[in-house]
Amino acid sequence: MLGGLMGGGLDPKKMKSMMKQLGINQEDIDANRVIIEKEDSKIVIENPSVQKIKMQGQESWQIVGEAHEEALGINGNEVLIQPYNCKNEQTLSAQKNEGSIAGHDWASYNTKRYIRVTLDRPKIKSGNLYKYHLTMANLLNSYFETLVGYKYRLGETNYKPDEHIWSVWQKQADGGGRVRILPKHVSEPVRSIMDILKQLN
């Protein structure tokens, strides 16, 4: 019945009046964005056309627009992923410094390219940023043949590649000293770990 009423170029005002007679109320909602939160991601619809429809005491929503999904609710402004092809002196120097963070034998894995991922450190053990760190760690350790190093802040240079722990100078009651923060080396390819285990058998 509704399909017949809405066809044939019916005037929108008459159509709205007929829908009202049928107990159907439709209201246009002025919205800039619609966000649907899932367990581990968000669906974002920008500049949508939104209508609220009430019929027989029930309320439903109609949303039309282009949608994209943000994994773990983190968008491209919060995570920067930069692939580097080492073709000149500047990129080779950066790879040497950042490769040494991943491990002393980084050159035996790849001297042609690497990926730099920049994002904020999670302040608490919850939320999307924390989940992103855990997901990345799981992927890198379980599925990819790669070395991974962790630089705890931008601009930090690995002046002491033989030391496996990042440390910083902090003022203390007795004057001050270097305090250990966290490991530089995060991930070792599963293949190399399995090769070592085979040698032990």
Image (tube, helix red, strand yellow):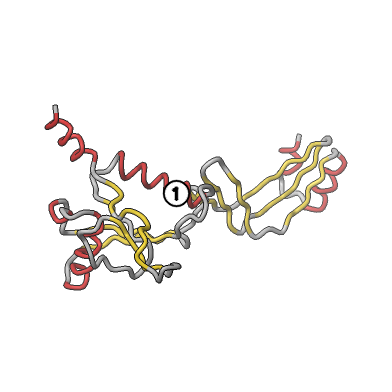
At horizontal 51% and vertical 43% (from top left) the residue drawn is 40
Q: In the rendered view, would you say 183 is above or below 134?
A: below
- Quarter of the figure with residue 91: bottom left
Q: Which of the image's four quarters has the C terminus?
A: top left
Q: Amino acid at mark 1?
A: Tyr
The residue nearer to you, when weighing 169 against 21, is 169
Residue farthest toward the right in the current orientation of the protein: 21
Residue 48: where, in percent of width, then height? 63, 55
Residue farthest toward the front in the current orientation of the protein: 174
Secondary structure at numbered mark 1: helix
Residue that carries the numbered disc 1 in the rendered image: 132
Residue 36: where, in percent of width, then height? 60, 46
At horizontal 75% and vertical 47% (from top left) the residue drawn is 52
Residue 137: where, in percent of width, then height? 36, 46
The residue nearer to you, when weighing 184 against 7, is 184
Residue farthest toward the top in the current orientation of the protein: 201
At horizontal 28% and vertical 52% (from top left) the residue drawn is 185
Left or right placement of residue 14 versus residue 168 in this view = right
Q: Which of the image's four quarters has the N terminus?
A: top right
Q: In the rendered view, would you say 182 is above or below 41?
A: below
The residue nearer to you, when weighing 156 against 55, is 156
Q: In the rendered view, would you say 98 is above or below 68?
A: below
